[in-house]
Image: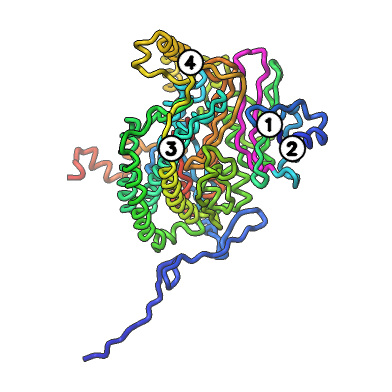
Amino acid sequence: MNPSVDRIKTRFPTAFVRAEVIWGETTVYLRTESVLDVVKYLHDDESERYDYLSDVTAVEYRDLELPLQVVWHLRSLPYRRFLRLKAEIAKGDPLKVPSVMPVYSGADWLERECFDMFGIQFDGHPDLRRILMWEQYAEGYPLRKDFPLRGRFSRSEQLRQALAAQPESRYSMTELTIADAFEDLPLEMRQRLAGGEKTGE
Amino acid sequence: MAEKRTVEVELSTSGLDAQGRPQRTPLVVDEGGRVTTMEAPPALEPELEGEHMLINIGPQHPATHGVLRLVLELDGETVVRCIPHIGYLHCGFEKIGEYRQYNQIIPWTDREDYLNSPGNNVAFALGAERLFGVEITPRCTVLRVIAMELSRIMSHLVWLGTTCIDIGAFTPFLWSFQERERIYTLLEQWIGARLTTTLTRVGGMGADIPDGWMDGLRDFTRTFPKTIAEVDRMVTRNGIWVGRTIGIGALSATDATNAGLSGPMLRASGVAYDVRKDFPYLDYETYDFDVPVGTSGDVYDRFLCRMEELRQSVRILEQAAARLPDGPVNVDDARLILPPKSKATSEMESMIHHFKQVMEGPRPPVGETYVAVESPKGEKGYYFVSDGTPKPVRWRIRPPSYVNLSAIPRMVEGHLLSDVIAINASIDIVMGEIDR
């Protein structure tokens, strides 16, 4: 078992839930609200030095009674250690965990993706937006188990929404139409063109 | 007759000294943690009319290496703000994986980082095998090392060629793609496919190497270093190349570690983190190879790191070719490996195994595992959660280029617009892996 487990246990008795080893990898289960404190300790303490955040993700089981888990994979490059942290969110509880952005800047996109795919709110993330799906995406959170593989809406409904979305309205620069361009021409030129004169020959 | 005169000329190309060596200036970290060179940092141009310009690079720009869209706010030609937008290629690999058996997912791994398909196949198989609790055969281990290093060379060659084109050198692109073609030929002889290889199975390989294949590999490892040397001679001390890459997009070691960068991106900043050395798999600890590490973390150091990795991969390939043992490729486990076709059509037992495996799929025990390998882009991880059914509850890809790309705003801000292209090229992104 990873030696950090005992130190987390003694230092954060209220945060520590349980630890297990599976296939040589140590997992520490923590209370949701204290994840950031433990991560801060793991990052800063001289005997831990977990300076590398490999991954942030979540797991929802097919058995819908089981809690949803948020998973952090940490590495200590100086000590060559690997540790998995987990926080469990019971069914019905708000999907909210603290963001580890204050400790690892690399958590930025990883947390955004987790929010995008599972709808988990990372408290303290400065810019929690959808990242892989577009921002107007309204069908829900694709990696949740209650989300059907083909999406919630039919193909025709998806197409209708895409066409109705009018992406042009959000472009920063509007495209110039022929009529606009004509209006911008000098008066004398407009008169000549209106008189039937051909250009560019 | 006029006297013949000789004149000492100073080499005037920027970034090179009189001997033609690249001039390196030590980097300085300011209070804000940003890395700057000793020379004047790229100063913001005077605000001409106080008006900033917004421009889009991509999603259809050739220099974005795929469908990346960067929204840049420019003050003159200096980037003030950079907002990347991704997701144009998102196809929900992880969701689809939850509806597939383990062996059926392997073709999907080809398509995520498609420059490194054999490497992804191996990484996936390693993860699934740990989940199943299977020990692979010695021959399979060495074959997988060969596959991983070949795919590393393949991916680095694409990076080299496209980056050279981005920065304005066309010839190395042709040279590197010529070499890549030879690896494709080798892979085609081995598994029958060139790009989407689906090389591995859980517990073994899709096929053993054909007779005489090792001669082809030895021929490649013998002649390939010549191409690296040629590119090296052409590019490494080239004034334009050096001028456009040194001091561009630098990240300090702590910044890069904190941002979760991996692979050559992290090593160029001076952190010697290589999964092959630090968390070894496939007996990489028994191979003799070096991990190149940069000092200043700029585009030039990333280039040097990748060039050296090409040479180190050749070293590993030579050692693997020398030690390849005889014996079976697949584990002897009817639970996992399909019986030979001739047996499946003639023996009742084998037919049952075949039927059960194809229709139902092998069942791993309940559990979870995170397996990381050193892909050409960095730490590539697969996280599996199993509930004992033939399909994973969760199959998570830890995409190295996704995390590497997330640091791009920090790298480009303060640099010129043309540097954005060089920095983006140096990250070595594959949008298939980022969007998945």
Q: Are marks 2 and 1 on the same chain?
A: yes
Residue type, mark 3 in image: Pro
Q: Indicate the chain on which mark 4 is placed.
A: B
Where is residue B55 drawn, in percent x and y? Answer: 45, 44
Q: What segment is highlighted magenta in the picture?
A: A50-76
Tell me the residue that label 4 is attached to: B361
Alpha carbon distance from label 2 to label 1: 10 Å
Residue B77 as seen in the image, left or right of residue B61: right
Q: CA distance from mark 1 to mark 3?
A: 34 Å
| Closer-to-camera residue (B53/A29) | A29
Residue at disc 4, secondary structure: loop
Tag 1: residue type? Thr
Question: Are the residues under marks 2 and 3 on the same chain?
Answer: no
B74 part of magenta stretch: no
Q: Residue lying at the far top in this picture: please name it.
A: B348
The foreground one among B181 and A158 is: B181
Would residue A142 be seen by someone viewing this image from the given angle?
yes
What is the C-alpha distance between the residues marked 3 and 4? Answer: 30 Å
Quadrant containing the N terminus of chain B is bottom left
Looking at the picture, how far across and down is residue A192, in whole percent?
23, 42
The residue at which mark 2 appears reads as A4
Q: Which secondary structure, mark 1?
A: strand
Q: Are marks 2 and 1 in contact (CB under 8 Å)?
A: yes
The verdict on a common chain for dots 1 and 3 is: no
What residue does disc 3 label? B325
